[in-house]
Image (spheres, rainbow, N blue to C red):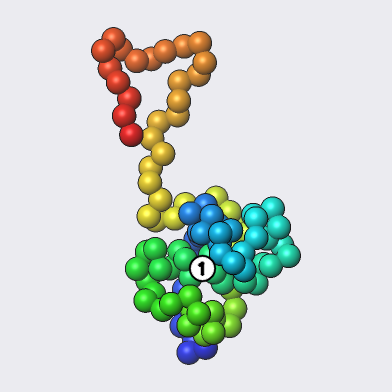
Amino acid sequence: MEDGTTFDVVADQRDVAKFEIQDFGCSATELSSRFATAYRFMAWSALSRRGETKLKWSDFDAQCVEVVDMPDEESAVPADAEDPGPPAPSEGSSSRSRGSRASR
C-alpha cells in the first residue's frame, strides 16, 4: 500500500466470482487481460471478507501500489474457507448405514 502496509491474503472462488460481475470485470478465463485490476480487486475482496480492511474498493484501489501472485502457494486454502467435508462415496458403492441422511 502507499503507506508501506503489506497484507498476505489468499483469494478464492468467492472473490473471483465477485470480480467477474463488476462492470470492469471479466470472466476468469480472461483474467490475464486485466490481471492488475483483477488481482487488486480480489485482494481487496478477500481482505474485506475477512475483516482485515474497512476501505471501500475505490479507496483501496487508489492506495494499492502492488499485488503479486504467489505461485508457490497455489494450493493454499484461505483461513475462512469452509471444510468441504469427506469425499463423496464412489459410484456403485455406498458406505451409508440404513436410515442415515447426509446434510450440509
Q: Secondary structure at mark 1?
A: helix
Q: Is residue 38 visible?
A: no
- To which quarter of the image does residue 87 belong? top left
The reply, left or right, for residue 44 in relation to residue 24 is: left
The reply, left or right, for residue 40 in relation to residue 8 is: right
Residue beneath the point at 43% across and 68% down: 47
Residue 83 picture location, percent across and down? 38, 42
Q: Report which residue position mark 1 lands on.
A: 43
Q: Is residue 29 visible?
A: yes
Is 91 placed above or below 67 here? Answer: above
Is 57 placed above or below 31 here? Answer: below
Residue beneath the point at 52% across and 85% down: 63
- To which quarter of the image does residue 40 belong? bottom right
Residue 18 picture location, percent across and down? 51, 59
Residue type, numbered disc 1: Ala
Residue beneath the point at 39% across and 56% down: 79
91 and 29: which is toward the camera: 29
> Circle 1: is it few (<14), some (14-19), or many (20+) Cα within 10 Å?
many
User: Residue pushed farthest front?
Assistant: 23
